[in-house]
Each structure stands twice: as C-alpha cells, then as structure tokens.
Image (cartoon, helix red, strand yellow):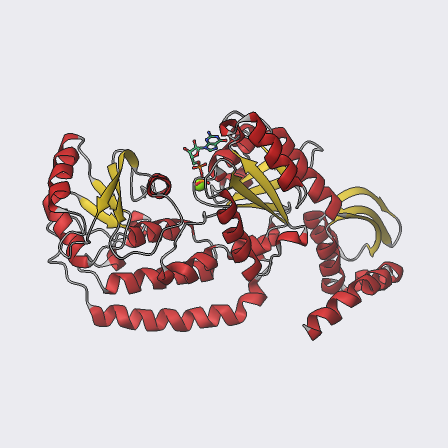
Amino acid sequence: MASPWSMTDFALVVHPDIQAGSAPRLRSAEARLDEAMGLAAAIGLDVVLGEVVAVKQARPATLIGGGVVERLSETIAEHEISVAVIDAALTPVQQRNLEQAWQCKVIDRTGLILEIFGARARTKEGKLQVELAALSYQRSRLVRSWTHLERQRGGFGFMGGPGESQLEIDRRLITERITRLKKELAQVQRTRGLHRGARQRVPYPVVAFVGYTNAGKSTLFNRLTDAEVLARDQLFATLDPTMRRVVLPSGQIAILSDTVGFISDLPTDLIAAFRATLEEVLEADLILHIRDAAHEDSRAQQADVEAVLADLGVAAGSGRVLEVLNKSDLLAPEERARLTLREAGERPVVLCSALTGEGCEAVLAMIDQELSAKRLQVSLALPLSSGKALSWLYDHAEVLSREDEDLVSRLELKIAPQDLQRSLKKFPELLQSNTELAKSLQAAEEPVESHLQSG
Ligand SMILES: Nc1nc2c(ncn2[C@@H]2O[C@H](COP(=O)(O)OP(=O)(O)O)[C@@H](O)[C@H]2O)c(=O)[nH]1
Ligand SMILES: [Mg+2]
C-alpha cells in the first residue's frame, strides 16, 4: 500500500507565534517553523510554503486571526495545497473550522507528530504506546474512525477531510480499545526482558543515530550508506528501510539505524510514545548523537538528548555515545576551531557536513575504531558435537580462524564482550571446555554485578 502522503500532497506549514500570556520561549519562532517543516517533510509531504503567523490573542474559532485565515485561503487555492499543518495544538472545533475555510485537510502539531511516530515505531511496545496516544487524541476529535484507515494508509489517518465530520467516532469502542491496549502494554512491559535480543539475529553491530529533527540524521545516514544502497543484498532489502549496512574502513560491517528524531516541546501526552520509539536505541552497540552545530539552540538540544538518553539508562560518558557535529559547512572558520576545541575535551567528537561530505570519512573511522575497541580477541575450544554453539558464534562473532581436531574445533574469534558472556551462558559446553576463559571473565564481571545488585 502507498504511504499516507505522497509528494503530490502540497503542504503549507504555519507556525502560530502566540504572544499573549505565554511564557517566554526558548526557541525562536523561525527555528520552530523550520522544525515543523522538517517534520512535515518527514511524513512525505511536499512542503511548498512555511510561514510564521503572529497571534496576539488565540481565537477560540480558528486560533489564528480572521484576516490571516482569509489571506491564507487564497494562498492555499493558488498553490493547490491539500494539507495545512498548524504547528500548535488545535481544538477539534478550530481544526474543523479551518478545514471548512480552506477546503483542505488541516493537521495540528500533535497529529503531525503522531503520524511520524506511527510510521516509525518498531518495537511492540513502541507501536502500542503510539497507538494508545493516537487513540486518546482521537477520542477528543470528530474525525473519521482511525480503525478502518490506519493500516491501509500506513499512518493513523487523523485527518477527516472536509465534509467527513458526519463520520462519528464510537467513543465507547475507543475507550474499550484503550483499556485493552493498556493491558497489552503492561504485559509487554513485563515480558520485555525476555524478548530483548531478538534483533541480535542481525549478525553485525548496530549503530543508532539519535538527535534532534533537522540535525541531519537522514542526510548523513544516506551519505554514509550511499554506495551500499545499490549493492544491497536480499537480507538487507527486507530490513526496515531505516536500517542499512555500511562497510567501515577496516572492512568490518555495521548496520546504521536512523531513529526517530527528538522534537522540541514535545506535547506531554506523547512523551511515553516517543520514549518507546527510542527503545531500540538501548539495543544498539553504539549510539551516534548527531547535532546541528550551526543551530542557535545547539547546546540546549544537546542537553535534552543527553537527559533523555540518561533516563533510558545510557550515560553520555559511558563510551556508548559518540558525538557528530554536523553542518560544519555553515560555520565560520573561527567558529569551527572554537567548537572542536571546546567539545573535544568532553568526549569523542567529529565535525562534519552531511551536505558537502566533509568529515564523513572521519565519522566512519570513528565508528570503526569504537566498535573494534569494544571487541575482544579470544581463543575458544568447543566440542565438534556442538553445532548450535558453532553456528551461534558464526552469527555473533568474527571468526578469524578455525581448526577442527578429532573432538574439538579451535576458534580464534573477535567478539563483543557481552556476546562472549552470552555464549557462555547459553551453551554450558563452552564453559566446560574453556574454564580458564570463563574464570577470567567472571572475575572481570563481578564488581559490575555486585554494583548492580546494590544499586
Ligand atoms: N548546510 C547543511 N545542511 C544540512 C546538512 N545536513 C543536513 N542538512 C539539511 O538539514 C535539513 C534536515 O536534514 P535531515 O537529514 O532531514 O535531518 P533529520 O531530521 O535529522 O533526519 C535538510 O534540509 C538537509 O538538507 C549539512 O551538513 N549542512
Ligand atoms: Mg530524518
């Protein structure tokens, strides 16, 4: 089925800059408009116009002023715009009135973000959380019932077009569905630990991209994996399009994963859904934090991302997070020098431009180096009878050499420490034939385990 939007949907993005009674804003209206335009593009809309609209006093009927509504009405007709994105929370009444005035679909900020999360959630929990948030949002709106539409359209189908408001939502059904979803979610959360590791079937380390919307994650992702798109083999053709294989300078292979972006001032109803979509990051071997170095809020964004990662259990200084300062092409020379100096003192960091390609080799080299540093080189003996353990090791480690004797195979491996631990737990026969190795690993592990228990 086609995606919910196509590039034939021309879109207008409006950021209402609401002045009355609002707290001082950290981010400029222009920066927020940019972000909203990036989000609209991310769901496949062809954004032809974006505008900041000053709103002195929010109007109950349309949020923005009547004069502006009229002026935009002409613009919308002139440019054949079929979707208008209002970067604010609209009441159902405001949404419907604007749709009537403009004769096009109107989507508000929450609807827009839900579309993105809906398209991007990968884990079971992520999907449930997004569905839950979508239903709660839906319950308050007189638009056509999502249940018939969301899967067909690949999104959640929040936008009843003009004239569709006669399709009433059966609130009772939605409420029941919400109750069921909550139960299912609790169940998934209880058994989550058991299902972790399912993705480990991908026999390569995974590098997850995180960062704010518009930082350049997708552009960098495309540039780094460019050559690979054409050469993509069957296995990867079936994977999520946001996961792609890359060959690092040393020849080792990794999977890059472009995750859902951070969004400024995320509506509170959506925080749980957003975090659940980030769950997969926890399973990544390495996290690449892509920053827009030229953004006026670059430091505030960095702090936000680090706080959320910390909440998820990934500390910025843990060695799992690497930083990429993107958009170097927009920096003046003295700015670059200052940035690299200041930021380099804190943690590994590379300056690059996904647009010009400058520094992108260095990004790959940094990933390469970090992944290699994490892996151990070990010799393992295993009984020839243990075919399962052998094939598991082939899937999870790089086999440097292998010698088969009468009863045992001797393997020289490069393997991530956590995979070595796992293999020894999973296959007791490995423990028995490698007692020395097991002992040294246990010794190394103990302080960590006792720390975990006491913490
Ligand atoms: N000048 C400049 N623009 C960039 C760079 N990387 C990305 N962009 C632009 O920034 C915008 C957002 O990029 P995108 O990759 O979609 O960001 P994402 O939301 O993090 O995936 C797009 O208009 C890109 O063309 C860069 O290195 N330099
Ligand atoms: Mg992106």
Q: Quadrant of the C terminus?
A: bottom right
Q: Is residue 286 shown left or right of residue 440? A: left
Viewer-proximal residue, 284 or 395? Answer: 284
Confirm whether residue 247 shows in the render.
no
Viewer-proximal residue, 28 or 243? Answer: 28
Instruction: Please state the quadrant of the image where ligand 1 appears.
Output: top left
Measuring from the top left, give residue 79's x and y in whole percent: 18, 31
From this view, report whether residue 390 is shown above or below residue 175: above
Viewer-proximal residue, 433 or 58? Answer: 58
Confirm whether residue 56 shows in the render.
yes
From this view, report whether residue 113 is shown above or below residue 176: above
Instruction: Name the quadrant containing residue 249.
Output: top right
Measuring from the top left, give residue 164's x and y in whole percent: 13, 53
From this view, report whether residue 132 is shown above or below residue 87: below
Q: Quadrant of the N terminus?
A: top left
From this view, report whether residue 263 is shown above or below residue 453: above
For image coordinates 73% across by 42% down, the residue present is 372
The number of numbered badges drawn on the structure is 0
